[in-house]
Image: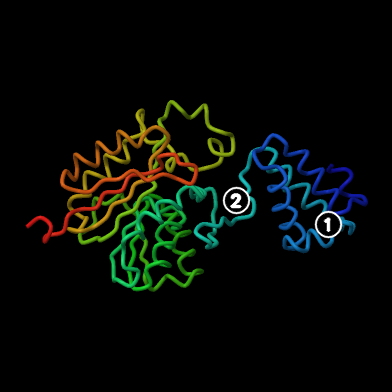
């Protein structure tokens, strides 16, 4: 395709040939279309309407380069620099984990049975791009949020995303080791921590293992190191009546329920399923003072 792209390819033909080059990825046509939009500056409607137009040489060369990067395994989100989550657009780079649609079920679990106008204090541990915290602040307009990450580069990206979304006045971002240095009083704690066992590294797709930050993926031999660190401080920082939500990896929800139950023996604990019906997280709602009495 690269040699032909310098000639007289139409947008439609360039798109089809790029998809053929990307046949090894999960969504070849979708990825090719996103990269074509980046190279041409067109939106979806424009790509369709101008499918018979010739692709200018400079755009053809740029498109060929983008397709080559994707074919080598680089994630589309890192190539474009953006990823949508909860209908919000987030800047991403290899310094942060790419937001996944599956994680939106965590947001749904938090907002269920919660007054959207209440002034909650929200904590996002391992905030990365800030997508979870920003999504919650969007849903709870009178709430304040804190995002913590061990990476200064990730914190810079999360802070920039909060500014872009107009949420910066209600958000603060800190470099830290989970919740060790934080004071208590949080009404909502949410986390999508690293949970992949180190031994599973070789079985991961190239676009994950070779490009996304290892510190956001792997959590010791069992995959439960981050959960242990979070739950060690959770009773101290989660307010009575508060809610903690943790994303879980494949096959981990059962053991995570046991860990959360041990940490909060009096809490109401539920498993969260994603859109495909797979266990994706665990939520615990701590009893209030009134309920304890």
**Nearer to us: label 1 or label 2:** 2
Residue positioned 46% across, 39% down in the render = 214
Instruction: Find disc 2 in the rendering and name its residue.
Output: 77
Residue positioned 44% across, 58% down in the render = 130
Residue 73: % across, % down: 64, 38
Compared with residue 143, is residue 3 higher up or lower down, i.e. above or below?
A: above
Q: Secondary structure at mark 2?
A: helix
Determine whether, in the image, residue 121 is placed left or right of residue 59: left
The residues bearing labels 1 and 2 have C-alpha atoms spaced at a distance of: 22 Å
Residue 142: % across, % down: 34, 73
Instruction: Find disc 1 in the rendering and name its residue.
Output: 58
Determine whether, in the image, residue 8 is placed left or right of residue 133: right
Report the colour scheme.
rainbow
Residue positioned 37% across, 44% down in the render = 281
Q: Is the N terminus in the top left, top right, bottom left or bottom right quadrant?
A: top right
Residue positioned 36% across, 71% down in the render = 170
Disc count in the image? Answer: 2
Disc marking residue 24: none
**Neighbours of disc 2 within 10 Å: few (<14), some (14-19), many (20+):** some
Compared with residue 207, is residue 36 higher up or lower down, i.e. above or below?
A: below
217 or 13, nearer to the observer: 13
Determine whether, in the image, residue 63 is placed left or right of residue 7: left
The residue most toward the left is: 293
**Neighbours of disc 1 within 10 Å: few (<14), some (14-19), many (20+):** few
Residue 86: % across, % down: 49, 59
Q: Is the C terminus in the top left, top right, bottom left or bottom right quadrant?
A: bottom left
Compared with residue 90, is residue 217 higher up or lower down, i.e. above or below?
A: above
The residue most toward the right is: 8
Determine whether, in the image, residue 151 is placed left or right of residue 42: left
Which of the marked residues, 1 or 2, is nearer the chain's N terminus?
A: 1
Q: Quadrant of residue 243?
A: bottom left
């Amino acid at each position: 395709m690269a040699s032909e792209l310098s000639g007289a390819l139409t947008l439609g033909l360039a798109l089809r040939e790029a998809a053929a080059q990307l046949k090894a990825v999960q969504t070849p046509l979708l990825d090719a279309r996103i990269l074509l939009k980046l190279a041409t500056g067109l939106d979806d409607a424009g790509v369709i309407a101008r499918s018979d137009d010739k692709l200018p040489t400079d755009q053809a060369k740029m498109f060929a380069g983008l397709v080559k990067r994707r074919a080598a395994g680089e994630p589309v989100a890192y190539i474009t620099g953006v990823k949508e989550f909860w209908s919000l657009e987030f800047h991403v780079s290899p310094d942060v984990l790419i937001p996944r649609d599956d994680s939106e079920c965590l947001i749904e679990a938090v907002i269920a049975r919660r007054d959207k106008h209440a002034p909650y204090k929200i904590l996002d541990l391992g905030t990365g791009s800030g997508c979870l915290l920003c999504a919650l602040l969007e849903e709870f307009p009178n709430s304040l949020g804190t995002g913590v990450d061990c990476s200064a580069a990730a914190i810079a990206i999360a802070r920039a995303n909060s500014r872009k979304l107009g949420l910066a006045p209600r958000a603060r971002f800190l470099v830290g080791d989970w919740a060790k240095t934080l004071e208590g009083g949080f009404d909502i704690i949410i986390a999508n921590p690293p949970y992949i066992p180190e031994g599973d590294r070789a079985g991961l797709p190239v676009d994950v293992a070779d490009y996304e930050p290892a510190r956001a993926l792997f959590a010791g031999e069992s995959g439960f190191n981050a959960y242990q660190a979070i739950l060690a401080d959770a009773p101290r920082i989660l307010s009575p009546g508060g809610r903690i939500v943790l994303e879980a990896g494949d096959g981990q929800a059962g053991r995570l329920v046991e860990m959360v139950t041990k940490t909060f023996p009096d809490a109401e604990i539920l498993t969260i399923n994603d859109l495909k019906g797979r266990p994706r997280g665990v939520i615990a709602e701590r009893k209030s003072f009134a309920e304890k009495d």
